[in-house]
Amino acid sequence: MRIGDLEMDLLKHNVTRGARSVDLLPREYALLEHLMQHGGEVVTRTMLFEAVWNYRYDERTNVIDVHISRLRRKVDAPGEPPLLHTVRGAGYVVRAPE
């Protein structure tokens, strides 16, 4: 899968951004995979929680926010245009810069 210069090789189980390798933990990989499968579409917290954690979403938890923050630091390095965006009140989206 590819969005902009972010590429995920599902067979080799690796992620690159341009020429840079992105090292992800298993849960981060699953989170990014789900977001990339829905590239350009807003994915809600509920959808992420159910797809990646296999649990019903609990509004009191910040586990998704923590994982998105870690994933954003790894995927969107300083100086690179951001690919992982927060849509206030809705969820998250991965999209290439316009």
Image (cartoon, helix red, strand yellow):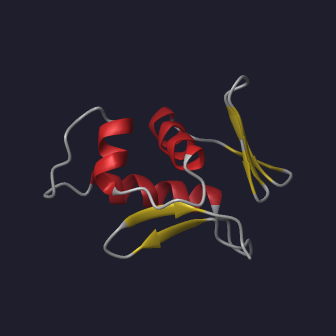
3 vs 28: above or below:
below
Can you give x and y, in whole percent of width and height, for residue 31 in the image? 47, 43
Q: Is residue 29 left or right of residue 16?
A: left
Q: Is residue 65 left or right of residue 84?
A: left
Can you give x and y, in whole percent of width and height, for residue 77 in the image? 67, 65
Q: Quadrant of the N terminus?
A: top right
Q: Residue placed at 35% from the left, 57% from the top?
A: 44
14 vs 62: above or below:
above
21 vs 98: above or below:
above
View extreme (right): residue: 19
Q: Residue placed at 74% from the left, 76% from the top?
A: 98
Q: Residue placed at 86% from the left, 51% from the top?
A: 19
9 vs 42: above or below:
above
Quadrant assignment, res 39: bottom right
Q: Is residue 38 left or right of residue 68?
A: right
Can you give x and y, in whole percent of width and height, for residue 57 in the image? 20, 47
Can you give x and y, in whole percent of width and height, for residue 88 in the image? 37, 76
Quadrant assignment, res 50: top left
| Tally of marks | 0
Q: Is residue 46 left or right of residue 19?
A: left
Q: Residue placed at 29% from the left, 32% from the top?
A: 54
View extreme (top): residue: 11
